[in-house]
Amino acid sequence: MANIIGAVTTSHIPAIANAMANGLEQTPYWKPFFDAYPPVRDWLNEKKPDVIILFYNDHGLEFFIDKKPTFAMGVADEYHNADEGWGIPTIPPVTGESELSWHIANSIVDEGFDMTICQEMKVDHGLTVPLNLMWPGHQYGHVKVIPVCINCEQYPMPQPWRTFELGRAIGRAVQSYEEDINVVVFGTGGMSHQLDGERAGFINRAFDIDCLDKLVSDPEALTKYTNMDLVEQGGAQAVELNMHIAMRGTLLGKVTELHRNYHAPISNTGSGLMLLEHEMPKGE
Ligand code: DHB
Ligand code: FE
């Protein structure tokens, strides 16, 4: 039986990729951010998950504002990135996992999620930056990745309760997959940030830290927020917290926090890194 053994939240901002490409990790600006990552990398290297289910948002590379699926997922064996204009070096392809992807797609569509299913899909910084952060030097080719995309760019966007339910459905789909594999779920992006308008640069540390607490021990509380609540509390782009909420939805069993770091600002964002271990009760 497939098993979700843990979950990670991480920032996805393009500036991270540029800092890594230019060897800036130990400069005063970046050190407090990058120094938080080794424990999570070590855990991933020790546990060696077979598959990463990665919740992210596509900022316009594959889905521009003229066509925006509310939810989309990849079912391909390989994914490519392309130049988004951030100056990030070209990256090697990301390995997919078509069999489990199709199993999840069939299962969640049967449950009522009208998922856009992509046999080809370019993946943007929302997916590539988190992978490179966990396996620096783009050493992630051995890990199979299932990209799941949540619209955080163009209204109407799915609400937190719905993204949490999507996570729940994906968690159930993984549970019902017969092959004996280990899965880790990534919730990427966030936390509070606003990139334009009157409140550009807005960050709300207290809100971010409260969200991290609730992701561990009271995720249902987060599903009570509307996207407008997230915008008010955390800035226009805080809707990216929906990826963290979807991630938490997949964890149907017991959750233990193993590592956490909050650092702000990093570029325009509050950055929340968290590693959760997950265990299903025996017999479920
Ligand atoms: C930044 C934040 C984002 O969420 C993003 O997608 C791109 C850039 C930033 O703060 O630099
Ligand atoms: Fe973003």
Image (cartoon, rainbow, N blue to C red):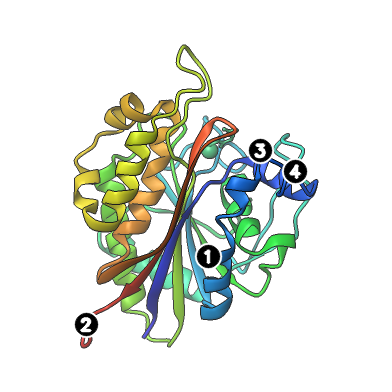
Mark 3 burial class by Cα count in 10 Å: few <14, some 14-19, many 20+: few
Image quadrant in which the N terminus is located: bottom left
* Residue 100 spot, x, y in % from top left: 46, 74
The residue pinned by badge 2 equals 284
Which of pointers 4 and 1 indicates the residue nearer the eye?
1
Q: Which residue is mark 3?
A: 29
Q: Earlier in the sequence, mark 4 or mark 1?
A: 1
The answer to whether the residue labelled 3 contacts the one labelled 1, judged by CB atoms less than 8 Å apart, is no
Q: Residue at x 65, y 41 (%)?
A: 14
38 or 20, nearer to the observer: 38
Does the Cβ of the disc 2 residue fall within 8 Å of ligand 2?
no
Q: Position of residue 117 (x, y in %)?
A: 47, 56
Residue where numbered disc 1 is placed: 40
**Which residue lies at the image location 26% right of the left edge and 54% below the top edge?**
165
Q: Are marks 2 and 3 in contact (CB under 8 Å)?
A: no
- The Cα–Cα distance between marks 1 and 2, rounded to whole angstroms, is 27 Å
Q: Is residue 78 left or right of residue 98?
A: right
- Which one is earlier in the sequence, the residue at label 1 or at label 2? 1
Q: Is residue 225 visible?
A: yes
> Do the numbered discs 3 and 4 sit on residues whose CB atoms are within 8 Å?
no
Determine the residue positioned at 75% across, 45% down. Answer: 24
Decide if residue 213 is on the left or right side of residue 88. left
Q: Nearer the viewer, mark 3 or mark 1?
A: 3
Q: CA distance from mark 4 to mark 2?
A: 43 Å
* Residue identifier under label 4: 88
Tell me the quarter of the picture where residue 113 sits: bottom left
Per the image, label 1 sits on a secondary structure element best described as helix
